[in-house]
Every structure is written in C-alpha cells, then in structure tokens.
Image: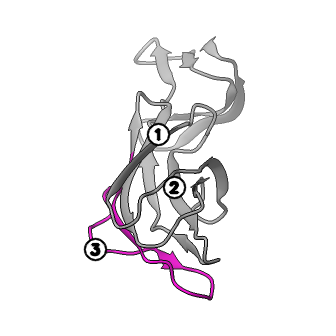
Amino acid sequence: IIYKPGNTFLELSEGKSANIQMLQFEVFLEQYNTSVLTWSLITSDPLEKFEVERSIDNNLYINIVTLFPDVPLNEQEDFKTTDDVSNVNNPVIYYRMKIPGTTGVVKYSDVRSVRKNVKKAIVNIFPNPVNDKVSIQVLTEKAGEGLIRLIDDTGRIIYSQKQKLVKGINI
C-alpha cells in the first residue's frame, strides 16, 4: 500500500494551491491492534499541521491525531504515527491525510486501508457422526451473537437458531 512518487494531494478548496508532493504514504497493521502510518513529502509552502483521519466505511472520517510538525521547505521530510485499533470492530480500516496549508487550501491524500485479522470462533461438534443428539461447543474471544445452523448431508437446514455467546466457552 504505497502512494506512488510524483503524485500530489487532492485539493478541496479554492485559493492559492499549496505545492505539496507526497513521495510515500504507507499503512500497515502491526501486532493485530496497531496501525502504523508512514509518509514522506516535499513542500515549497509552509504547512500548519497534519491531521490523520480514520474511517470504517470509507465515507465518514474522524480525526484520530493532529501533528504540528516543523517542516523544512523544499526538503524531503519523513513522518510516522501509530493508531491503536484494538476497539475498532471492523475488518477493514481506512486512513487518509488532511493537510490544511497556511494559504487556506486544504488538501487530502489518497485513501489507504488495512485489513484487521478478525478471529473467528472455534467450534467443536460431538459426537461425529451425529445420530439423535448433538453437542456444540463454541469458544469465542468476546461476547456477541452467533447463528447456529445444522445442515444435513443433502444440504437441508434442519436446525437454525440465534444464540447469545459469552466470552470463552459456550455449550
């Protein structure tokens, strides 16, 4: 997930265009719960701040961190920040950079995304094969609602029920 050299930001306001060249923009997931964002840029205009924005639907973005860097003009500068996503309950997380310039122009980067590894429940069914009665054991990392569906060897659904699950073992 790399922003290709030579591209510039998308400008969303009128006025004198700030000359910002994004050289690199990467986002990756580290140890399941931390997004690491790195970027490099060159600018010939002073920058006021960077705002890193996150979204779970690639539509509505929220500001997760604001940085006030001292960016030298006409020199490549590298940046890095992290985002704790342990409480983000979505498999895909989107990021973009918002850079309001001192000229009043606001620029947005292209969107980058990471895929959060969503762990599924561990299910044990016994006895197998089943005759008259079946026991189902579900191990989950967090509480939630699950759907138990039993399907026979012809593909017919013979049992279906929503079930509240607690964190840990459910029988």
Is residue 13 in sight in this rendering?
Answer: yes
Left or right of 37, for residue 49: right
Q: Magenta residues, as a range?
A: 1-27
Q: Which mark is residue 95?
A: 2
Task: Tell me the quarter of the image containing the N terminus.
Answer: bottom left
Between the C-alphas of marks 3 and 1, the distance is 25 Å
Q: Is residue 80 above or below residue 62?
A: above
Q: Residues within 10 Å of mark 2 (few under 14, many from 20)?
A: many
Q: Residues within 10 Å of mark 3 (few under 14, many from 20)?
A: few
Task: Tell me the quarter of the image containing the C terminus.
Answer: top right
What amino acid is at disc 3? Gly
Residue under the point 28% across and 74% down: 6
**Element marked by disc 1:** strand
**Element marked by disc 3:** loop
Left or right of 11, for residue 65: right
Place of residue 54 in the rendered image (x, y in percent of width and height, measured from the top left)? 59, 53
- Residue identifier under label 3: 6
Q: How is the image coloured?
A: one colour
Is residue 171 in sight in this rendering?
Answer: no
Task: Assign the magenta stretch its main secondary structure.
Answer: loop
Q: Quick check: marks 1 and 2 in contact, CB under 8 Å?
A: yes
The answer to which of marks 3 and 1 sits earlier in the sequence is 3
- Residue identifier under label 1: 35
